[in-house]
Amino acid sequence: MSESTSYKAPRWAWWVATGFGSGYLKPAPGTWGSFVAALVWLGLQRLAVHRLPGADLLTGWLAYGILPAMALTWISIRASDAVATETGTKDPSFIVADEWAGQWFAMAPLWLLVPIKGPMPILAAWALIPFLAFRLFDVWKPGLIDDLQSLPGGKGIVMDDVLAGLYAGTLTALVLFLLRP
């Protein structure tokens, strides 16, 4: 569904919607977008640990796990809507802001169940669980996840991935709880 439009999305919307360019990587831009989102999340969490040294796990989880994912969701909806409007397409494959938002929700349980202050290679290994779980739910789209794609504009682009991220986060929490030493 490509229709001509004179609307031009702001430059920031293009940067956000394409996951800072990760949506242009081939093949499988959604997987690349999720991968880059996971790497950025891990890097930000390492910085956050040093900013909130005395905080309890719940505070860290909310401040650095959930709230950033919610903020990213909000801005991703707006950016995706603007870029989709400019291109005249419903959900172009280069828009991966939805993968970023969903992936960040999937990663949030790491705050509660994995020592964020631990060695980076160990944290990165644990991060494979939410990454793979999110990709599974994002591609499979069981139940309500698939239904959310019919929402209009940016909401339809982003909210199915957010729900996939919440499903993946729940699965991640369960797996980490069972596997954690």
Image (cartoon, helix red, strand yellow):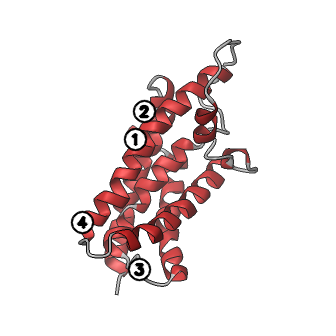
- Give the CA separation, mark 2 to mark 4: 32 Å
Q: Would you say the residues marked 4 and 1 are in contact, meaning their CB atoms lie under 8 Å apart?
A: no
Circle 3 residue: 117
- Give the CA separation, mark 1 to mark 2: 7 Å
Q: Would you say the residues marked 1 and 2 are in contact, meaning their CB atoms lie under 8 Å apart?
A: yes
Q: Position of residue 38 (x, y in %)?
A: 54, 61
Q: Secondary structure at mark 4?
A: helix
Residue at position x 57%, y 64% in the image? 39
- Give the CA separation, mark 4 to mark 3: 15 Å
Q: Amino acid at mark 1?
A: Gly
- Give the CA separation, mark 4 to mark 1: 30 Å
Q: Would you say the residues marked 3 and 2 are in contact, meaning their CB atoms lie under 8 Å apart?
A: no
Q: Nearer the viewer, mark 4 or mark 1?
A: 4
Per the rendering, the mark at residue 84 is: none
Q: Residue furthest front?
A: 51
Circle 1 residue: 143
Per the rendering, the mark at residue 58 is: 4
- Give the CA separation, mark 3 to mark 2: 38 Å
Q: Position of residue 70 (x, y in %)?
A: 37, 46
Q: Position of residue 42 (x, y in %)?
A: 50, 67
